[in-house]
Image (spheres, grey):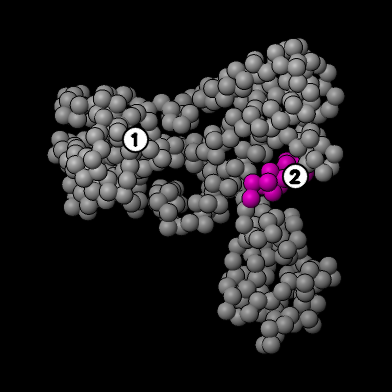
Amino acid sequence: MVGLVCGIQPSMARLKTAGLDDGCFLVKGDGKGVGLSSLLQKAGRERRINGVQVGLEAPNISHLLFADDSLIFSTANLEEVASVKQCLLLYERAAGQRMNFQKSAVSFSLSVSDDLKVSIQNFLGVSFVPFHERYLGIPTVAGKSKKMMFKRINDRLVSHMSGWQSKFLSKAGKLVLVKAVAQAIPTYAMNVFRLPKGVCRSFQSKVSNYWWGDGKGKRGIHWGKWSLLCHNKKYGRLGFRDIQGFNQALLAKTVWRIATNPNSLVHTVLQAKYFPDSNWVVVRSCPGVSMIWSSLLWGRDLLVNGLRWRVGKGESIKVWGDKWLPVPWNFQVVSPRSGNPNLMVSDLPTQHGMWNVPLVESLFLPHEVETILTIPLARPRYQDNIVWHYGKDGIYNVKSGVWLAMELRNK
């Protein structure tokens, strides 16, 4: 049974405010397939369904599919609504699955008149909701109080811990519960949003009180700082998660995935909306942006602190100013500038593909000379590329991201 239910895709949660205000409606439901997507794409090519755009250069989005949910966007007029319903009914006949319109929901942008809302709702035979409040447990609309948005996270933690208090557990048992259950509760939300500091502190305080408590709900003596317990077990600590650092590391992972897939839909949409003439590294936040975008920029800030060039030909890397030395923290040359200010790394090797030692020694301080001469020079056909310094394969990983976030905060 294929049915439509209410909700909205978290990564597109701001479509309503960004692009649905020109007379559009949203219908959401479960059940998807290549066939349904093909039908909607064909209707879009024939201009029977216009979908929505978040910017002039952004792609036209007629539908989004996630797991067993389908979201369909269209201009709010009966002609396009009829085309949407035609696609759904045709999919019914082809797939042998029946749409459940009783479990469907439709929402409208503010510019749609009440009479038109009623007409579309009756034509589709679905229920009306003002907006989809949550999807997969994540709020879809950011209100004035961000703390209230994420109140559910702390409520879930309290619900779990109230059941744990009656259990007589050893420290090892508590350790498993804290790591596997308690600290996993906000993980999905932290992939999308930057949690307010107050929410992080409240969450961490509850976990800390449970860890040091006597198991009967009474507060115990805190024999050590929580920040110390968050360090790696190989240093004699317990390896608990630093919630704020973990949040930023997860958002950095989201940014890495989007930035390294420039042909993806989400990258195309975000670029058209926020940085049409720029790139991820230099784009800055501005007033009025969505909470998701400002959260991604916070993750981007962490990611940028660990990115550097891996030398290939060296033709894309400036000697002065670019980050190309494999030495943290800034990866940049600190030697006084001399000679050509526009010198490229490709000017430093000899014609035989070896470092020009006399030239390098004349330009850089001794400790940088030693570092540069250890950088292997790739064969000429290899291009320069951006890598994550703290990963062995140059690919970002959350574990090293958390470590870097904590180190930067303690500097």
Q: Residue at x 19, y 42 (%)?
A: 93
Q: Is the stretch drawn in magenta largely helix, strand or loop? A: helix
Q: Is residue 10 above or below residue 137?
A: below
Query: Which is in the foreground here, disc 1 or disc 2?
Result: 1
Residue 410 among magenta residues: yes
Residue 139 is marked as: none
Q: Residue at x 57, y 25 (%)?
A: 153
State the SS at label 2.
helix
- Identify the mark nearer the N-term, 1 or 2: 1
Q: Residue at x 77, y 74 (%)?
A: 373
Q: Is residue 354 above or below residue 246?
A: below
The N terminus: image quadrant? top left
Magenta residues span 397-411
Residue 30 is marked as: 1
Residue 81 position within the rendered picture, expressed as x and y whole percent measured from the top left? 19, 37
Label 2: how many Cα within 10 Å (few below 14, some 14–19, many 20+): few
| Residue 53 in view in this figure | no
In the image: residue 363, left or right of residue 10:
right
Residue of label 2: 407
State the SS at label 1.
strand
Residue 323 among magenta residues: no
- Going by the numbered disc 1, the residue's amino acid type is Asp
- Going by the numbered disc 2, the residue's amino acid type is Glu
Q: Nearer the viewer, residue 363 or 181?
A: 181
Label 1: how many Cα within 10 Å (few below 14, some 14–19, many 20+): many
